[in-house]
Image: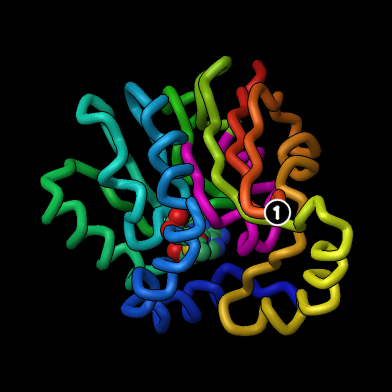
């Protein structure tokens, strides 16, 4: 079961007001720490793809110039409010990760978190991130995917269709394979919580 970007936008528009509450659970499992660790590496002009409600915004160093996109207007509205409260300057844009409205090499770094599970064509989205990132610039990803414990991975496989119904989240994707398939060079990987959550540092090769 794969949803289109338009269907996903509708789903996340409806879910936007609950997102932060529900997302508190992975935060408690260590995702908040992964966000901090991922984002302290950022500098310069940074694009965040599928920014959602802006849960990463508090973790960027102050000297970053931030542009953030998402396909859901309601998620962006929550992110705009959060940026205002945090006094973080961000240019928000409604856009599809699979057709980013920027020219090649527009950014020093690209960030995306917990979103590769929902993109209809994750490899296309990753290739778009690489296209808009300067050659040699970092693409920093925080993803969840299929566990590397066989018993748990097989359980995720069995329940994947059911789990994807409400928000289009395919929880048994293999983020590392997708990154490699997109032609990015992986430079560092950390996995936590039964190998489900991945912090992936990759480079956009020229
Ligand atoms: C699970 S949320 C993650 C939000 C945020 N990145 C975070 O770490 O909390 C997935 C986000 O991806 C967005 N999304 C899904 N498909 C998209 C697409 N094709 N282009 C841009 N955003 C998309 C959804 O609207 C939603 O905000």
Q: Is residue 13 above or below residue 131?
A: below
Q: Nearer the viewer, residue 200 or 45?
A: 200
Magenta-colored stretch includes residue 204: no
- Residue 120 falls in which quadrant of the image? bottom right
Magenta-colored stretch includes residue 115: yes
Res. 71 visible in picture: no
Q: Residue at x 66, y 32 (%)?
A: 189
Percent position of residue 103, x then y: 48, 32
Q: Nearer the viewer, residue 12 or 190?
A: 190
Q: Which residues are magenta?
A: 111-129
Res. 186 visible in picture: yes
Q: Residue at x 43, y 23 (%)?
A: 108
Residue occupied by mark 1: 194
Q: Nearer the viewer, residue 96 or 184?
A: 184
Percent position of residue 36, x then y: 39, 39
Q: Residue at x 20, y 58 (%)?
A: 82
Q: Is residue 196 above or below residue 138?
A: below
Q: Residue at x 29, y 46 (%)?
A: 57
Crowdedness near tag 1: few (<14), some (14–19) or many (≥20) residues, C-alpha within 10 Å: few
């Amino acid at each position: 079961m794969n949803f289109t970007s338009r269907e996903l936008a509708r789903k996340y528009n409806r879910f936007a007001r609950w997102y932060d509450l529900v997302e508190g659970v992975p935060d408690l499992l260590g995702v908040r720490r992964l966000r901090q660790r991922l984002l302290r590496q950022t500098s310069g002009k940074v694009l965040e793809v599928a920014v959602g409600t802006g849960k990463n915004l508090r973790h960027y160093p102050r000297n970053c110039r931030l542009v953030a996109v998402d396909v859901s207007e309601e998620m962006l509205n929550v992110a705009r409010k959060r940026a205002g409260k945090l006094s973080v300057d961000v240019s928000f844009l409604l856009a599809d990760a699979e057709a980013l409205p920027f020219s090649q090499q527009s950014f020093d770094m690209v960030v995306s978190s917990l979103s590769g599970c929902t993109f209809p064509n994750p490899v296309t989205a990753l290739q778009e991130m690489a296209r808009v990132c300067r050659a040699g610039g970092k693409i920093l990803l925080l993803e969840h995917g299929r566990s590397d414990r066989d018993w748990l991975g097989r359980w995720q496989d069995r329940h994947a269709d059911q789990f994807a119904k409400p928000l289009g989240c395919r929880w048994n994707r293999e983020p590392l394979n997708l990154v490699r398939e997109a032609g990015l060079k992986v430079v560092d990987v950390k996995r936590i919580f039964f190998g489900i959550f991945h912090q992936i540092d990759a480079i956009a090769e020229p």
